[in-house]
Image (cartoon, rainbow, N blue to C red):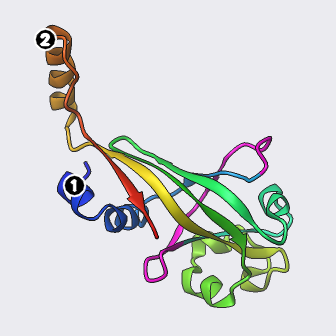
Amino acid sequence: MANLDKLKENPKEQLFDHLEDVRAVMLGSPVHEQHMQPMAPQIDEETGTIWFYTNKSSDLVKSLGQDGGEVHMCVVEKDYQACLLGDLTVDHNQQKIDKFWSSVVAAWFEGDKNDPDLTMLCFRPKNGSIWASDKNPITFAWEIAKANHKDEKPDIGERQSVDFH
C-alpha cells in the first residue's frame, strides 16, 4: 500500500523510492507504431534520471536515433500507478553501466560489461501523474459497496501530478 501522505508532500521522492522496488516498467518509443516494452529501471535519484540496460540493436534504440525522443514510462501495480513523460536518449555511460551492474543484468549480456551490443538508455522525466491507494482489499470492497448504495464515488486513493523541472 502506498503512503498517501508522502504522495501529497513529495511525489517525486515517493516515486523514486517506489521505483527502487519495481522489477519492470513499460517504456514507450518515439515511433508511435511501436508498442511499449517492459524494461528494468535503474534509479539515479541524485540526477533525477532513470537508466535502462539494452542492446544497441534493439528496436527501441533504433527508433531513438542520435537525438533521442520524447516517450512515456508507465508503472502499473496493485496499489500504485504512474505515467511519466520525458526524454529518452541513448547514452553509453560506462560509469552508469558499472554503477547498476548486477548478476541479473549480466544474464542478458554474453560479453558481460564488455558486450559490444550493450548500451544504456537515459530517461529524464519532465512531468507525470501518480495514482495510489492505501486501502486493503476489505476497505476497497466496503468503499465500492458504500458508493453503490449511496450513489457516490468511492474513496479509494489519491492522484498527484508531478513536475520534474
Magenta segment includes 125? no
Q: Residue at the front extreme?
A: 165
Category of crowding for the residue at label 2, using alpha-carbon neighbours closer than 10 angstroms: few (below 14), some (14–19), many (at least 20) = few
Magenta segment includes 36? yes
Spatial CA span between label 1 and label 2: 27 Å
Amino acid identity at mark 2: Lys
Q: What x and y, as percent, mark residue 31? A: 79, 49
- In the rendered view, would you say 146 is above or below 67? above
Amino acid identity at mark 1: Asn
Q: Give the residue displayed 73% in from the left and 62% down from the top.
A: 69
Q: What x and y, as percent, mark residue 99? A: 56, 86
Residue that numbered label 1 is attached to: 3
Residue 112 lies in quadrant: bottom right
In the shown orientation, is residue 29 left or right of residue 25?
right
Q: Does label 1 or label 2 sit earlier along the sequence?
A: 1
Q: What x and y, as percent, mark residue 54? A: 72, 67
Q: Which residues fall within the magenta stretch?
A: 31-49
